[in-house]
Amino acid sequence: MHADVVPSTESPLDRASTAERAAEVLRDRITEGYYRPGTRLSEEAICAELKVSRNTLREAFRLLIHERLLSQQPYRGVSVRVLSVHDVIDLYQVRKVIECGAVAASTSTDYDRAAQAVAKANRPSPGPTGRASAPRTSTSTRPW
């Protein structure tokens, strides 16, 4: 090893490809509601926004299709996946397991931490428009 070469602490596997970074941006936009379920994604517009090639964007689409965030239909293109009733049931079953486990794991000394977590979860969060959304409560009406 030469004295003027500084060894990198970053593993070559830690570096994300451009397609992975584009997929991360799209994943964030989907989960934040910027792209609504069923929305067709325009390659041209997204390539221009992210300043990536079509091949790179198509690889990002493939990654998100594999994650089941996007769906691809022949002659129609790529769109944000719409959740089925079965998907929603699965999500709530997982949520039930996690929440019940958290309650069961809490002890009398964890009340302050649990109260802070509940307060944080109920704080309004900025939506896709940048405005704060209504606090999440267990009695709120869900659109699904």
Image (cartoon, rainbow, N blue to C red):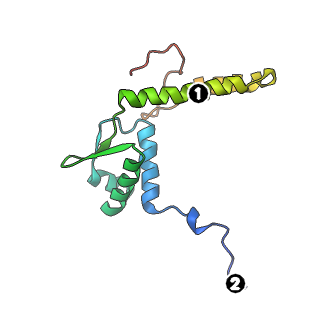
**Residue sitting at the far right:** 109
Between 7 and 71, the one lying in front of the other is 71
- Check disc 1 and report the residue beneath it: 97
Residue plotted at (27% across, 54% down): 44
Give the crowd class for mark 2: few <14, some 14-19, many >=20 residues within 10 Å: few
Secondary structure beneath label 2: loop
Percent from the top left, x then y, of residue 26? 41, 47
Question: Is residue 140 shown above or below 119?
Answer: above
Question: Is residue 65 shown above or below 12?
Answer: above
**Residue sitting at the far bottom:** 2
Percent from the top left, x then y, of residue 24? 46, 50
The answer to whether marks 1 and 2 mark residues whose Cβ atoms lie closer than 8 Å is no
Which label sits in the foreground, 1 or 2?
A: 1
Q: Is residue 30 left or right of residue 78?
A: right
- Check disc 2 and report the residue beneath it: 4
Secondary structure beneath label 1: helix
Which label sits on residue 14? none
Q: Quadrant of residue 128?
A: top left
Quadrant of the frame with the N terminus: bottom right
Q: CA distance from mark 1 to mark 2?
A: 54 Å
Residue plotted at (70% across, 23% down): 104
Percent from the top left, x then y, of residue 98? 60, 29
